[in-house]
Image (cartoon, helix red, strand yellow):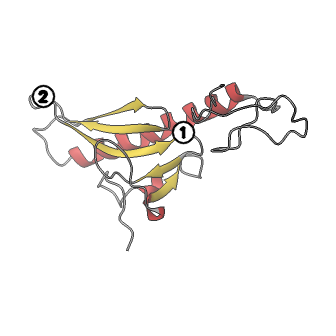
Amino acid sequence: MPTCPSCRHHFRVLEDEDDGQHGCPACGYHPNQDTNQEDDMRDFEGALAAYVAAVQGRVNQYYQKFATLTPSTVLTQRGPKFVRIIVQDAQPSRSASAHSFVRIADGDILFCAGWNGPSRKPSAVRGNIYDEGNGLPALAPAPSYHLRYLR
């Protein structure tokens, strides 16, 4: 069984189906699609890098008021469906916390349910890395670097 390159879901391609309707039932990927996935991934990587840079900029802005502290570092960790955005403290503790998750399929910025994954609620979406501002409106007002809460 082939695996969907988009969502890694296993799906079955039936040889007798010529209607073009078979493919991944989870995300709609079709093995004969005329899409250029390399360009899509380059667009995603560029938008993700801009979002990470925006979060790092907010972290640096937040730490300016603490003269003796070193700013935290923003890192990414890629999974099969999501990219975890991590804020790692500087020396000596080196503790890390999940800041947000970015869904690879559509670029949505999701609120964390914890370290392991995003919240599955529909209200967990805070923004999109493809929007104007590359997801910066998803953050709380400056100088905070946390995601905004919905009220």
- The answer to whether residue 51 is left or right of residue 60 is right
Of labels 1 and 2, the one closer to you: 1
**Which disc number belongs to residue 69?**
none
Image position of 40 with respect to 21: above or below: above
Of residues 27 and 10, the one nearer the viewer is: 10
Q: Marks 2 and 1: in contact by CB < 8 Å?
A: no
Give the amino acid type for the residue marked by disc 1 in the picture.
Ile
Occupied quadrant, residue 43: top right
Query: Percent from the top left, x then y, of residue 136?
Result: 46, 51
**Which disc number belongs to residue 91?**
2
Occupied quadrant, residue 84: top left
- The answer to whether residue 134 is left or right of residue 86 is right
- State the residue lying farthest toward the right: 18
C-alpha span from label 1 to label 2:
31 Å
Q: Which residue is drawn at 22% across and 45% down?
A: 64
Quadrant for the N terminus, please. Answer: top right
Occupied quadrant, residue 139: bottom left
Give the amino acid type for the residue marked by disc 2 in the picture.
Gln
How many marks on residues?
A: 2
Q: Which residue is drawn at 46% across and 58% down?
A: 126
Q: Name the secondary structure under disc 1.
A: loop
Mark 2: few, some, or many residues within 10 Å (few <14, many ≥20)? few
Instruction: Give the mark nearer the N terminus: 1 vs 2.
Output: 2
Which residue is identified by label 1? 104
Of residues 97 and 28, the one nearer the viewer is: 28
Query: Percent from the top left, x then y, of residue 79?
Result: 44, 32
Q: Which residue is drawn at 38% across and 43% down?
A: 55
Quadrant for the C terminus, please. Answer: bottom left
